[in-house]
Amino acid sequence: MSRRISPRLPSWLPIDPYIMALIGTVALAALLPASGAAAETVGGVSTGAVALLFFLYGARLSTREAMDGLRHWRLHLTVLAATFVIFPLLGLAAGGLVPFVLTPQLYGGLLFLCLVPSTIQSSIAFTSMARGNVAAAICAGSFSSLAGIVLTPLLAALLLGQSAGGFSGDALLKIVLQLLVPFLAGQSLRRWVGGFLTRHKKFLGYVDRGAILLVVYTAFSEGMTAGIWHQVTPARLGALLGVEAVLLAVMLALTWYGPKRLGFGRADRIAIQFAGSKKSLAAGLPMASVLFGAQASLAVLPLMLFHQMQLMVCAVIAKRRAAQVSPVTSRPVEHAPGRGPQEVEDGHPDADAALQGQAVSRAGRAPDKIAE
C-alpha cells in the first residue's frame, strides 16, 4: 500500500532542488568568479570532470537493454526524429527572432538546446506516472543518449558554425578526446566496473551532479570575466522564457498527436511524448563547455531554464494522463501491492528510489541510472 506524503509545495510545482543548486552556483560565479591562475586550475579540473562524466555515462549505459528494445523500432525512430530532426528544425526557425526578440548569443544557446539528447530518468518517471509504456521509455531514452554522444556535437558544429568551434581539426579533436573517448572507455570497461557502479550509484550520483556544478561554475566565471552578461537584460530573459514556452508546447503537441496519426496506442504515445519532448541537462552542460568555451555561460542558460520548465509542465501532464485512467478519482489509480506506481512527494521526477521501482515493475528490469 502506498504511503501518502503531505506535500510542502503545490503538487503542480515540482521545484527541482538541483536547479536551486545550479542557481546558487551561478550566483557564486557572479560574486566570486575564478580568474587568473585560479581560472586555469578550475578549467583544468572542469575538463577532467567532463571526461569523468562521459566515462560514467558509458559505463552505466547498457547497450544490451537498448538492443533488446529494437523490436519496437518504429517508436524509437519516432523519438529520435523528434529529438534530432524536429527540435533542430524548430530551433532554426527561431532564427527569425534575431535580433528583435533574442540576441545572437541567446539564440545560439536556444539552438544548442534543440540539439541535446533526450533524458532517461525523468522520461521513465513521467511515463510511469502517466501509465505509459515504461519499457519503451527506457529504451528510447537510452537510444537518444547514445546517439547524442555523436549527433549533438556534429549538429552543433554544422548549425552553430564558429560559435561552437566549426569543423576545425582542433574542435573535432577536443570533442573526440573529451566526450567520445571517455564514453567508449566506459562502455568497454562496463563488464568490470558495472557492478561497482551499481553498488555505489547513490554516491556516484552526487559525483555526477558535483561535476556538473563545477562545469557550470567554470562557464559562468568565464562569462563574468569576459563581461558577456552585460549583453543580457531582464526583457531579453523574459523573451527567452516565452520562446521556450512556445517551443515546449509545440513539441508536446507534436509528440502526442503525431504518434496518434501514425497508429501508436495510448501507452506508446505517452512514452513518445515524454521521451521526445524533453532535453537532458546532464548531457547538455558538459557538451556545451567543450563546444562553446568562454561563451558557454550564455549557451547553457536556455537549457537550464528549459529543464525546469519541462519538469513543471510534464508533471502536470503526467498526473492528468494518469487521472484519465480512473473516472472515479482525480488521483492516479493504484495497482496491486508491489506492482504499481507509488505516490511520491510533490510528484517529483527525481525521487529516484520510488521511481526506479516503478520502472522495474513495469519493464521487468532496472534501467541504468544516468543523471539528467
Image (spheres, grey):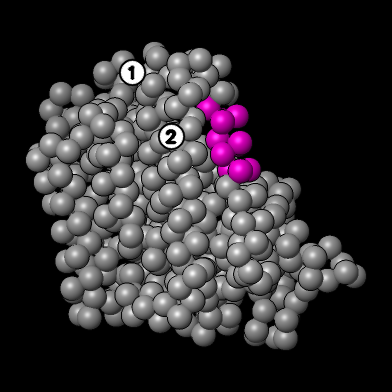
Q: Nearer the viewer, residue 306 or 140?
A: 140
Q: Quadrant of the N terminus?
A: bottom right
In this rendering, would 268 be left or right of 57? right
Which one is closest to the eye, mark 1 or mark 2?
2
Question: For residue 130: magenta?
Answer: no
The mark found on residue 228 in the picture is 1
In this rendering, would 136 be left or right of 344? left
Seen in the picture, residue 80 relative to 138 is either above or below; the reply is: above
Residue at the location (45% across, 80% down)?
Answer: 71
**Residue 46 coordinates in the image, percent (x, y):** 22, 43
In magenta, the rendered stretch is 240-250
Q: Nearer the viewer, residue 15 or 167?
A: 167
Residue at the location (66% across, 63% down)?
Answer: 260
Q: Let me know if residue 25 appears in the view.
A: no
Seen in the picture, residue 84 relative to 269 is either above or below; the reply is: above
Seen in the picture, residue 320 relative to 64 is either above or below; the reply is: above
**Residue 318 coordinates in the image, percent (x, y):** 68, 59
Q: Residue furthest right?
A: 328
At mark 2, the secondary structure is helix
Q: Amino acid at mark 2?
A: Leu
- Could you classify mark 1 by the number of other residues whose Cα lies within 10 Å: few (under 14), some (14-19), or many (20 or more)? some
User: Of helix, strand and loop, which mostly describes the magenta segment?
Assistant: helix
Which residue is tagged 2? Answer: 92
The mark found on residue 113 in the picture is none
Q: Amino acid at mark 1?
A: Ile
**Residue 265 coordinates in the image, percent (x, y):** 66, 72
- Could you classify mark 2 by the number of other residues whose Cα lies within 10 Å: few (under 14), some (14-19), or many (20 or more)? some
Q: Quadrant of the C terminus?
A: bottom left
Q: Nearer the viewer, residue 290 or 116?
A: 116
